[in-house]
């Protein structure tokens, strides 16, 4: 009782080649940089882009298996929520939600009842008669979710559903979406750029790049063992690769770091930016990894400042805004970076990545 797909899509020079399985009740987040093929994968599942090769089936029923089988979008039990809700502007909230059930043959009265129940579930019963333009972004997105779920889909596709919302609204809608996804017994694919959305909402992360799978696993597995720079950045970790000989790791890009526990052969090293400290002069007196760096960028995050430090190795460091002021930091400054050996995680690197 699973969605099983091998998404093989050629579009000009782009080739998507992704094997994907989603179990009932499972939420899979599809992540990857711009142009990785996330939207193409979602559109192929919806039937908006036909497969070139491969197959899609749900519970053993084929949806797409070129060249013979192609179930058109309207015959797939799929609900889709897009970033910019795409509600019908001329219809009220309740008519938007009732549209799907009506199109599938439900009587007008029954579709309206169903739509009102769904609007109630997403907390918008009082806005049933409102037109989309009078709703806030968060409300419109809730209507879009109700509209997708009202058709009782087996597969729910969410394309950046929170991306257009401001930070405060996003927090609420994310929490509410999480509750609905927990109750939803179908299969869910969530396309997102936001690591927090993925970490909070998904059971499993699938990371794509250049149309192919880079890494998959539970959010915890991916956070602890990122396999490439994109995933490391996504989960906010520094990720380096090198060769270990005892506690010394010679890094591929130059430089040596010391581990607390010995290891052998190709390894990935990861540590959070908060484990990196910066100093105006070489720090002394503790058995830490220290090396000279140049400050190339500063980004303000909620309570910290993230520093981009160029050196061997290059690293990200998160320090308090007070420390930025104390150190009078400016781009171009020559500094020393330090990270404790006990903060560095080492795990075997697969030869092909
Ligand atoms: N209609 C199209 N015809 C030809 N190529 C296309 C078409 N749509 C997208 N592509 C190409 O397919 C590749 C993947 O695009 P896609 O939109 O699936 O990536 P994405 O991971 O969703 O990116 P983003 O995060 O920017 O939305 C890109 O190289 C893009 O240029």
Image: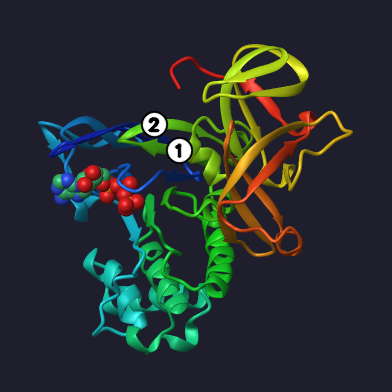
Work out whether mark 1 precedes mark 2 in sequence or the reverse, and give the earlier one: 1
Task: Judge whether 184 appears above or below 101 on screen.
Answer: above
Task: Judge whether 350 appears above or below 209 on screen.
Answer: above
Q: In which quarter of the image is residue 95?
A: bottom left
Q: What element carries label 1?
A: strand
> Which residue shows up at 67% across the image and 51% down it?
318
Q: In the drawing, what numbered circle is on residue 206?
A: 1
Question: In the image, is the residue at mark 2 within 8 Å of ligand 1 by its beta carbon?
Answer: no
Q: Quadrant of residue 172?
A: bottom right
Q: Nearer the viewer, residue 307 or 99?
A: 307
- Is 93 left, or right, of 203 in this rendering? left
Residue 193 in picture, x, y percent from top left: 44, 53
Q: Note whether residue 279 is visible.
A: yes
Q: Name the colour scheme.
A: rainbow
Q: Do the residues labelled 1 and 2 touch (CB within 8 Å)?
A: yes
Alpha-carbon span between mark 1 and mark 2: 7 Å
> Which residue shows up at 60% across the image and 31% down it?
225
Residue with the mark numbered 2? 213
Q: What element carries label 2?
A: strand
Residue 181 in picture, x, y percent from top left: 52, 56
């Amino acid at each position: 009782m699973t969605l099983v797909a091998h998404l093989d899509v050629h579009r000009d020079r782009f080739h998507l080649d992704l094997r994907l399985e989603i179990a009932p009740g499972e939420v899979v987040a599809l992540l990857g940089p711009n142009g990785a093929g996330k939207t193409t994968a979602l559109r192929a599942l919806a039937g908006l882009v036909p497969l070139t090769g491969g197959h899609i089936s749900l519970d053993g029923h084929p949806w797409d298996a070129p060249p013979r089988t192609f179930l058109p979008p309207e015959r797939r039990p799929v609900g889709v929520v897009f970033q910019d809700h795409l509600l019908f502007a001329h219809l009220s909230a309740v008519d938007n939600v009732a549209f799907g059930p009506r199109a599938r043959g439900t009587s007008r009265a029954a579709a309206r009842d169903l739509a009102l129940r769904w609007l109630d579930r997403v907390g918008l019963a009082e806005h049933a008669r409102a037109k989309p333009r009078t709703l806030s972004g968060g409300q419109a997105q809730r209507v879009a979710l109700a509209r997708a779920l009202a058709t009782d889909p087996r597969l729910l596709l969410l394309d950046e559903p929170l991306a257009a919302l401001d930070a405060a609204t996003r927090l609420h809608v994310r929490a509410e979406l999480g509750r609905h996804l927990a109750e939803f017994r179908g299969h869910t694919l969530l396309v997102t750029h936001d690591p927090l959305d993925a970490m909070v909402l998904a059971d499993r992360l699938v990371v794509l790049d250049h149309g192919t799978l880079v890494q998959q696993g539970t959010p915890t597995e991916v956070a602890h063992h990122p396999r490439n720079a994109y995933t490391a950045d996504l989960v906010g970790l520094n990720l380096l690769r090198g060769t270990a000989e005892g506690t010394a790791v010679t890094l591929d890009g130059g430089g040596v770091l010391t581990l607390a526990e010995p290891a052998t052969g190709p390894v990935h090293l990861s540590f959070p930016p908060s484990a990196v400290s910066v100093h105006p002069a070489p720090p002394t007196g503790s058995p830490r990894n220290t090396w000279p760096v140049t400050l190339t960028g500063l980004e303000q995050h909620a309570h910290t400042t993230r520093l981009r430090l160029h050196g061997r190795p290059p690293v990200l460091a998160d320090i308090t805004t007070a420390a930025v002021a104390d150190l009078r930091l400016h781009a171009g400054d020559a500094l020393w970076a330090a990270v404790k050996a006990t903060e560095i995680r080492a795990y075997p690197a697969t030869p092909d990545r």
